Image (tube, grey):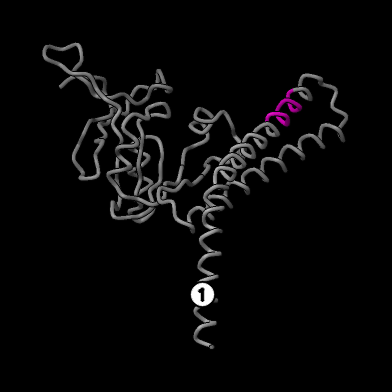
Amino acid sequence: MSGPNGVLIPVRNKDEMIQGLKIRLDSENAPERKYRWLSSRGMPNGTRSYSWVHITGNTASRRAFLTEGPLKGDVASFLSNDALLVSIGGVNALGGLRDAIQTLGVREIVEAMDMEAIRTLSGLNRSGTPLMVNSFYIIDDEKQRGKMTEEFYAAVKKEIAEYQERADYFIQSGCQSPAVMERWVLKIQGLEEKKRHYEKVLRRELDGLDDEFATLKFLAQELQARSRNIRFQKAA
């Protein structure tokens, strides 16, 4: 085996089988590329490497945390009493993630990326904190839908409050930079457009239920009429 000097990190599936190995390079010459996959590509009968999804922790858990990097996943799981961690190889390495999640049977995925990963994934850094957590749910039941809706509205309200604070600051401080003010005008317009988009989607989905509700209402009326008729016959 040959390659750059560094620490080998096993990348395992849910059954703890090693799928691949990542190398944490000892060299600091290129800190942005301090991790590389071990590969025999270019050698006789060699093979390329794949960006495997690493799974560690209690695989019976109904909640999994999604993060970047197998080493980070191992450490986070160890420090969190064997929490279930699903670690992708990089923020753009999403191949196989869906399949890996489906093998676990979890109810909830909690996104726990660092801010650099969040910027890459969404282009947004709303909180300015070193860690952002967001949840999305696998099982579509009433409790989970309610929680997901609450989290969505809380996120939107937080974003609106942040924009209001920034706009008010520029006004009160007498900002003299047209470029800065115009940039925030565009941000506010973008947020308004996002609100209209969600309203449109929700309205379309609700309108699609009109026929179903009309049929359901008719059936309810029929049940009520039958119930009243039986009660009337028993009382006679």
Q: Is disc 1 placed on a helix, strand or loop?
A: helix
The reply, left or right, for residue 168 in relation to residue 203 is right
| 115, above or below 223, in the image | above
Give how far across and how far down residue 146 sits, in percent: 54, 55
Seen at 43% across and 22% down, the residue is 32
Quarter occupied by the N terminus = top left
Q: Which residues are magenta?
A: 183-190
Seen at 72% across and 29% down, the residue is 189
* Residue 19 falls in image quadrant: top left
Give how far across and how far down residue 218 sits, in percent: 54, 58
Q: Is residue 147 inside the magenta stretch?
A: no
Q: Pick whichever, 55 or 82, lies toward us.
A: 55
* Residue 225 falls in image quadrant: bottom right
Which residue corresponds to mark 1?
227
Mark 1: amino acid: Ser
The reply, left or right, for residue 227 in relation to residue 46 is right
Seen at 52% across and 81% down, the residue is 231
The reply, left or right, for residue 174 in relation to residue 226 is right
Q: Residue furthest left?
A: 45
